[in-house]
Image (spheres, rainbow, N blue to C red):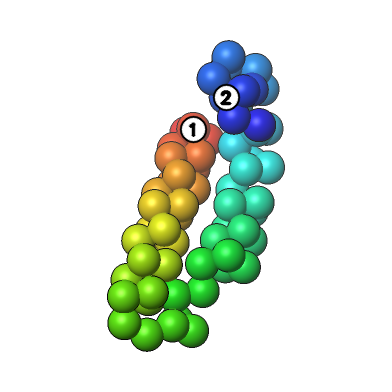
């Protein structure tokens, strides 16, 4: 999907499929609410980083 975005192929369709995929993966792989201390900070940083990619995909829909 990233390659399709890089080359501008079906941008809106790619963004639409990328958004739910990112949200699902973020929730499964970075559950920061389950951790404490330094591990929580690390997962929170990854969580926010990946959600930022999701917001970027939403901007492509405009």
Q: Which mark is residue 60?
A: 1
Q: CA distance from mark 2 to mark 1?
A: 9 Å
> Which residue is the site of mark 2?
5
* Badge 2 vs badge 1, beta-carbon distance below 8 Å: yes
Label 1 SS = helix
Residue 11 vertical placement versus 54 (above, below): above
Side of 53 where 6 appears, left or right: right
Label 2 SS = helix
Front in this rendered view, residue 41 or 61: 41
Residue in view at x 58 percent, y 16 percent: 8
Residue in view at x 38 percent, y 74 percent: 39
Across and down, in percent, residue 56 comes to 43, 40
Tell me if mark 1 has few (under 14), some (14-19) or many (20+) residues whose alpha carbon lies within 10 angstroms of its own. some
Front in this rendered view, residue 39 or 26: 39
Front in this rendered view, residue 12 or 31: 31
The image quarter containing residue 4 is: top right
């Amino acid at each position: 999907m990233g390659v399709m975005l890089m080359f501008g192929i079906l941008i809106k369709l790619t963004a639409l499929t990328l958004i739910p995929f990112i949200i699902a993966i973020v929730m499964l792989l970075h559950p920061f609410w389950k951790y404490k201390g330094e591990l929580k900070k690390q997962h929170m940083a990854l969580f926010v980083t990946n959600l930022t990619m999701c917001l970027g995909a939403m901007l492509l829909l405009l």
